[in-house]
Amino acid sequence: MTPAKLLEALVGIPSVSGSEGPLSDFLTLQLTAMGFQPQHLGHNLWFEVGRGSPRLLLVSHLDTVPPCAGWNTDPLKPHWEGESLHGLGANDAKGCVTAMILAAQMLTSSELGTEGTAVFAFVREEEVGGKGIAELLPHLGHFDAAVVGEPTGLKVCAAQRGMLVLQCTAKGVSAHVAHAKLGENAIHKAARDMVKLEAMSFEAHPLLGVTRPVVTQVNGGLARNQVPDQCEFIVDLRITPNLKDEEVTARLAAELESKVSVLASGYRPMATDPTHPIVRAALQAAGTKVPVGSDTTSDWAFLGDLPAVKAGPGDTLRSHRPNEWISLKELSAGTTFYAALAREFFRLKALEDCRG
């Protein structure tokens, strides 16, 4: 199967989060036909190339978000425009999955250059909370580093933002609007807090910049003729690795009139030392000198302290939007990148181990 046909086949199998089964089954058959030995845990699958240590994890996800409005063609039917394939998941992240599979073929058709094991894993439900990687990772054994396949234009991301979601509750006192002075307007109190939040920022990270709180939802008031006694609003902060959830939460609690509580904090901000072999190997494979930061979250958030980078073919700005696409040129570059990264990482890790 040609790279174009493999990409088209993957995009042609719908795999919205929670329905990755048919795609996982197809990949199992395809990988077996390629000579690999895929293993399953539910709708997650993985296979290994090489032998011994070090061990490198290359992971991407099978699921997509649901199709949004605004597509010019059927998002569930792959559509070629010249050398570019349009379809749901083409960019995020079936292009990465395809490139990793093709890279695995490259690694098996030639010597790795240095002994090591590349473990390729494709997981479910990344888009809805990282369920796949969380359940699969304990079964894969020890790793020395990881590569998370996401569309970055092959820019090497050595840091990514996390997510902290807070619920803020402003309390007031009800009254008839004709006698508003007898009450305390919770919406007005919440509005004052929202103005404060708009002007607030936190210490900058060298690769990611500053963090700013964003109000994303507001709910308050029971009737149009009653002073509201409660107003709730949600604050989303895409925090950086130099910030701690509890310190950010404490600052908002101290500066706002509203009561502040944590609603969600599962996505950790992540960063890897730019001098680590995985970052150096990725930069060498990409032909660049300096890593960047990523504003989006990914399964990297669930890898614990494992040194990692995030990189892959495609463009993050195409993700979760209508008319998503990826080109064959990007796919080819991604394939070469992943194979070169694995070889260079094994070489650098061997040198590091010898010096140690």
Image (tube, grey):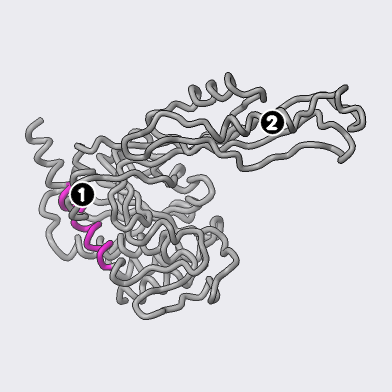
The quadrant the N terminus occupies is bottom left
At numbered mark 2, what does the secondary structure look like: helix, strand or loop? Answer: helix
Residue 109 relative to residue 217: left or right: left
Question: Does the magenta run of residues contain 334?
Answer: yes
Distance between mark 1 and mark 2 Cα atoms: 46 Å
Q: Residue type at mark 1?
A: Leu
> What residue sits right under mark 1 in the picture?
283
Residue 238 relative to residue 274: left or right: right
Magenta stretch: helix, strand or loop mostly = helix
Residue depicted at x 11% and y 50%: 114
Q: Return the disc, 1 or 2, that comes first in the chain's sequence.
A: 2
The quadrant the C terminus occupies is top left
Q: Residue type at mark 2?
A: Ala
Magenta stretch: give its range: 332-345
For residue 138, say whether it is visible: no
Image position, residue 61 (x, y; %) = 42, 55
Front-lying residue, 344 or 80: 80
Image position, residue 83 (x, y; %) = 34, 77
Residue depicted at x 69% and y 40%: 218
Q: Residue 190 carries which label?
A: 2
